[in-house]
Amino acid sequence: MAIEHFEVELVDASMIAPNVKHLVFKKADGSKFEFVPGQFITFLFDHEDGKLRRRSYSVATIPNQTDLIEIAISYVDGGIASENFFNMQKGQCFNVMGPAGRLILKENEVIDKLILVGTGTGIAPYRAMLPSLQTALTKNVKTVYILLGVQYQQDAIYAKDFRQYVKNTPNLHFIACLSREENALLEDEVKGYVQRYFEKLDLNPAHDVVYLCGNPNMIDDAFALLSEYGFDAKHVRREKYISSN
Ligand SMILES: Cc1cc2nc3c(=O)[nH]c(=O)nc-3n(C[C@H](O)[C@H](O)[C@H](O)COP(=O)(O)OP(=O)(O)OC[C@H]3O[C@@H](n4cnc5c(N)ncnc54)[C@H](O)[C@@H]3O)c2cc1C
């Protein structure tokens, strides 16, 4: 799919965690937004220093629910995109390019355990993958674990969607790993960092595949750990959430 330049218009916005906003856009020309689940789009901001700034966001849209573009953005104090996104009004338009990105499912790849790990908003691409995961679980993938790493229960964005799909999909699991929560945990919640959950999964580097998305430190830690288990780079797919300039 070619990378397009297009304009989007904000149609809805809501806080979904204390520090995270869910934003919904439509393409300004009214055409349908096409993407592969797991891809991101890049917003182009004119900054006051005269330079163009690029900020990328994973598409969180569940394809069979809407044609709109949904993203989740975590607020960074003073950040160029954060200040724009947290102060924008409905109807405001932005220049965007995309979709792009290789954190996508490979069609027909035979996998025993597919482990999808995301910290914070890094869970967004897996929300978009939910219908594709349902299909893959009837064909080429035996089991899927979606592991979300956040600090507290209240930070677990999109947990409702994951739980809904888990209820209706055999061999799909969702675990929220909460690093700081002191309250009682739900059945699918555990205490600790997300990468610590690997030891519970009896991973096999020959037959399992791991996707890592979000906080760069989590990705480096998790990759180091998986390398110790014998995973090579081919079986670990990574997307670090960093600003490009
Ligand atoms: C492929 C890709 C997909 C991405 N998808 C998402 C997504 O779905 N949701 C999302 O929220 N982000 C996502 N990001 C990160 C996003 O592009 C921005 O980097 C992020 O929103 C911060 O941009 P900003 O302009 O608000 O802050 P900036 O202007 O980039 O940063 C302001 C200051 O804060 C620091 N900073 C930047 N990020 C953080 C942080 N996370 N924590 C603490 N300090 C920080 C910077 O070093 C700088 O000093 C993605 C990045 C990539 C590369």
Image (cartoon, helix red, strand yellow):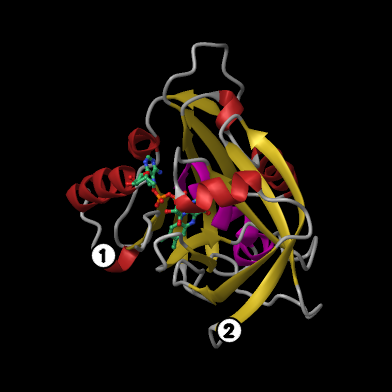
Instruction: Say which of 105 and 201 sits in front.
Output: 105
Please say if the residues under marks 1 and 2 sit with CB atoms less than 8 Å apart: no
Instruction: Say which of 6 and 202 sits in front.
Output: 6
The image shows residue 68 at horizontal and vertical percentages of 76, 65
User: Label 2 crowding class (10 Å Cα cut-off): few <14, some 14-19, many 20+?
Assistant: few
Span shown in magenta: 117-137
Q: Residue furthest bottom?
A: 2
Amino acid on which disc 2 is placed: Glu
Residue in the image at 80% along x and 63% along y: 66
Q: Kindly report the distance in space between the C-alpha atoms of the residues bearing marks 1 and 2.
A: 29 Å
Residue in the image at 67% along x and 50% along y: 88
The image shows residue 96 at horizontal and vertical percentages of 58, 72
* Discs 1/2, front: 2
Quadrant location, the N terminus: bottom right
Q: Is mark 2 on a helix, strand or loop?
A: strand
Which mark is on residue 4?
Answer: 2
Assess whether residue 118 is covered by the magenta stretch.
yes
The image shows residue 186 at horizontal and vertical percentages of 61, 21
Amino acid on which disc 1 is placed: Ala
The answer to whether residue 145 is seen in the rendering is no
Quadrant location, the C terminus: bottom left
Q: Relative to 143, is 164 on the left or the right?
A: right
Q: Quadrant of residue 209?
A: bottom left
Which mark is on residue 233?
Answer: 1
Q: Which residue lies furthest to the left in this view?
A: 228
Assess whether residue 5 is covered by the magenta stretch.
no
- What secondary structure is the stretch in magenta mostly built from? helix
Residue in the image at 78% along x and 80% along y: 29
